[in-house]
Amino acid sequence: MIILTDTSTRSSLVNASRKEKTDLTLPDGFDTIDFDALDYLGWRDPKMGRRAYAIVPTLDGEIIGVLLVQAQATPRSRAQCSWCRDTRLPNEVVFYGAKLAGPAGRRGSTVGTLICRDFQCSANVRNDPPLPYAGYDAGAARQDRKDELVLRASSFVERVARQ
């Protein structure tokens, strides 16, 4: 279970400057978010159009936050989210970039990935997958999708945090 406060959220951001941490706008209803229904917390900053944040628990139980910037260009064709890999996406997928933490990030090194624009991955993996054959265990498939989402999201933030 993720337990976040304003202070822990800001301090978890590994690739943000002090000013960027101060400028962070928490999502509406932050105090009432049901973290049991989320595999990670992601939101777009309402004051800064292309800026977004993702707070992800790693497999070690550590919380890592990353500041993301949406690319100005959009994919020419329907893209698949790299985190939830939902093929029936009801939402837009965009390219987010993140500068690396530490000296590499200060030199301008970045990594990027395709993610659901408004971070609906947790909801997407909880939807029932299409049944490919009779006797298919949809519950097990849903759990596998949740586990894989956690693995891919934590791998990305750990890559950003690595110095």
Image: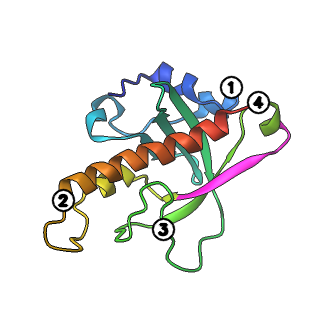
Q: Which callout, 4 or 1, points at the residue further toward the start of the chain?
A: 1
Q: Is residue 108 magenta?
A: yes
Tell me the CA gap for discs 1 and 2: 47 Å
Neighbor class of circle 2 (other Cα within 10 Å; few <14, some 14-19, many 20+) is few
User: Judging from the image, what secondary structure is the residue with disc 2 in?
Assistant: loop
Q: Residues within 10 Å of mark 4 (few under 14, many from 20)?
A: some
Mark linked to residue 137: 2
| The magenta stretch spans residue 153 | no
Marked residue nearer the N-terminal end (2 or 4): 4
Q: Which mark is residue 18?
A: 1
Callout 3 touching callout 2 (CB < 8 Å)? no
Element at badge 4? helix
Residue 145 or 92: which is nearer the viewer? 145
Q: Is residue 117 left or right of residue 144?
A: right
**Marks 1 & 3, CB-CB < 8 Å contact:** no
Left/right of residue 76 with respect to residue 123 in the rendered view = right
- Answer with the quarter of the image where residue 102 lies: top right
* Secondary element type, mark 1: helix
Residue at the far left: name it. 135
Q: Which residues are magenta?
A: 106-114
* Marked residue nearer the N-terminal end (1 or 3): 1
Separation of residues labelled 1 and 3 (CA atoms): 33 Å
Tally of marks: 4
